[in-house]
């Protein structure tokens, strides 16, 4: 017995030594103490885009040490300085392609870069079998959203888009109210935002200021058309340029269109039409600004009836400070949407009206009989951002197709179609501004209702609009 005991101890010692030599350390939970996570249970995360939203995405995924921030990649280290100081042991890169080539023990990636690089980075991560969290909007184009959705299932990775309101209690309450039949069948939805809060409807800059020290501009441009560096593009104002951003609709649509999309069980729209605010610097002659997103716009999307809602739905989006007027059921002195009415959602049913603010917060129901239903979130912080990201991390650990993965509120199976619908509005906005010479002026053939075949990703009655389904990629950059 003693001999066997010594042999067993020797075998255990040899096994432990071999594992340690490979960099694998197995530490029992009881040794660590209550509340601490053994290294073998931690997800190794690479953060791509570490400034602004990238910082909070990283902090939420790290979750007070539940995960390991193994690498930080940013084309401009000035932007990610705070994150790099927070995690000094993390490997540091400027080019995500080199990171993927060098580092093989990455389990998951957060992508918090400008819109135009979301898809190429996320696709590279997916093809490397890494789980992915991508900021909203999921992609820059409709085509990219479809490709990422399909690739996530093909490579069996766990995904989540960063529209954190999808995980909020407000949206859950709205689903409950609707499923209980409180407002009946919905046929009209209004969604609006005060964005843009950055310059839009302006001319492309022509001056050439000095480059920021340490900025890898070529990698920042990525798949987009090359232009010279300018502070009107980086670090924040890229949102207002079609080459890089998706305007007010792309910025806020995935937050604000999400509640009706989710509550009503919507799918691909069947038609879209936009009108766009013009800029005049001289009488009767509007500025022509094809590179810049417009100062304001209004877009109408039509969705077919769904399994949850038996009526066709007309969804009207407004931005640039435009908003709908009070429906009769909502008292004149009640704010609509947010407390200042800057952003919001109104769903109009045959039994009542449901409203909410940004991220689905503060939902209310106004019934035809004059009653009102309100929901007060009892959470200390009603914005569910940390949980939205942390639940993705736990789903990554659980694995593709498992219960925690299925419970995610914005995996690409859902976020892809939502993003496609949001970007349909931008397709219509850009089509609205297409012009061709006619006599001494121009005609605008895209200023009409556009009919959409969602399965084929194609406008069927105006071929020129289809150029906006998929971007042209700069040489050397593809999905």
Image (cartoon, rainbow, N blue to C red):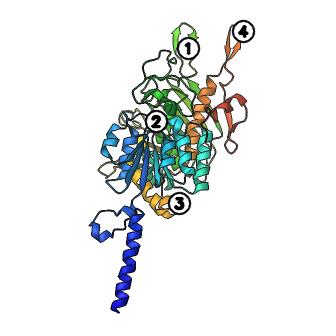
Residue 90 visible to an observer of this rendering: yes
Mark 3: few/some/many CA within 10 Å (<14, 14-19, 20+): some
What residue sits right under mark 4 in the picture?
439
Q: CA distance from mark 3 to mark 4?
A: 59 Å
What residue sits right under mark 1 in the picture?
287
Q: Earlier in the sequence, mark 2 or mark 4?
A: 2
- The reply to whether discs 2 and 4 touch (Cβ–Cβ < 8 Å) is no
- The reply to whether discs 1 and 3 touch (Cβ–Cβ < 8 Å) is no
250 in relation to 435, above or below: below
Q: CA distance from mark 1 to mark 2?
A: 38 Å
What residue sits right under mark 2 in the picture?
328
Q: Earlier in the sequence, mark 3 or mark 4?
A: 3
**Image coordinates for residue 193, horizontal then vertical, percent:** 45, 32
370 in relation to 288, above or below: below
**Image coordinates for residue 302, horizontal then vertical, percent:** 61, 39
Q: Which one is closest to the eye, mark 3 or mark 2?
A: 3
SS class of the residue under badge 4?
loop
SS class of the residue under badge 1?
loop
Which quarter of the figure is the N terminus placed in? bottom left
């Amino acid at each position: 017995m003693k001999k066997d005991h010594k042999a067993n101890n020797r075998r255990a010692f040899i096994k432990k030594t071999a594992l340690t030599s490979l960099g694998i350390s197995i530490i029992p939970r009881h040794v660590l103490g209550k509340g601490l996570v053994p290294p073998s249970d931690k997800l190794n995360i690479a953060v791509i885009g570490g400034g602004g939203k990238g910082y909070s995405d990283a902090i939420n995924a790290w979750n007070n040490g539940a995960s390991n921030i193994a690498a930080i990649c940013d084309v401009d280290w000035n932007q990610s300085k705070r994150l790099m100081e927070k995690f000094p042991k993390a490997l540091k890169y400027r080019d995500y392609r080199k990171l993927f080539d060098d580092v093989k023990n990455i389990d998951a990636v957060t992508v918090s870069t400008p819109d135009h690089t979301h898809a190429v980075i996320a696709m590279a991560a997916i093809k490397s079998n890494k789980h992915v969290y991508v900021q909203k909007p999921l992609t820059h184009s409709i085509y990219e959203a479809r490709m990422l959705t399909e690739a996530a299932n093909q490579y069996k990775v766990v995904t989540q888009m960063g529209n954190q309101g999808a995980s909020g209690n407000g949206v859950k309450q709205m689903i409950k109210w609707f499923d209980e039949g409180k407002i009946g069948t919905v046929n009209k939805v209004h969604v609006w935002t005060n964005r843009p809060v950055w310059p839009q409807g302006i001319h492309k800059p022509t001056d050439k200021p000095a480059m920021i020290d340490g900025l890898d501009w070529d990698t920042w441009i990525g798949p987009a058309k090359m232009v010279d560096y300018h502070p009107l593009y980086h670090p924040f104002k890229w949102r207002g340029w079609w080459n890089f951003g998706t305007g007010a609709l792309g910025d806020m649509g995935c937050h604000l269109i999400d509640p009706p999309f989710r509550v009503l069980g919507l799918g691909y729209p069947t038609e879209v039409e936009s009108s766009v605010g013009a800029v005049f610097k001289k009488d009767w002659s509007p500025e022509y600004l094809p590179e810049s997103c417009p100062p304001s716009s209004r877009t109408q999307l039509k969705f077919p009836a769904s399994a949850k809602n038996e009526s066709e739905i007309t969804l009207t989006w407004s931005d640039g400070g435009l908003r709908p007027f009070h429906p009769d059921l909502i008292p004149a002195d009640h704010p609509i949407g947010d407390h200042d009415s800057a952003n919001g959602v109104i769903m109009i049913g045959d039994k009542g009206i449901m409203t909410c603010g940004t991220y689905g917060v503060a939902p209310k129901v106004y019934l035809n009989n004059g009653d009102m239903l309100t929901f007060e979130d009892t959470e200390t912080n009603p914005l569910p951002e940390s949980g939205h990201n942390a639940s993705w991390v736990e789903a990554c650990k659980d694995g593709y197709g498992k219960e925690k993965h299925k419970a995610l509120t914005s995996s690409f199976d859902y976020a892809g179609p939502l993003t496609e619908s949001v970007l349909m509005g931008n397709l219509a906005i850009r089509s609205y501004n297409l012009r061709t010479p006619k006599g001494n002026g121009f005609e605008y053939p895209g200023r009409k209702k556009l009919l959409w075949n969602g399965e084929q990703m194609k406008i069927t009655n105006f071929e020129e609009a289809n150029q906006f389904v998929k971007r042209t990629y700069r040489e050397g950059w593809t999905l």
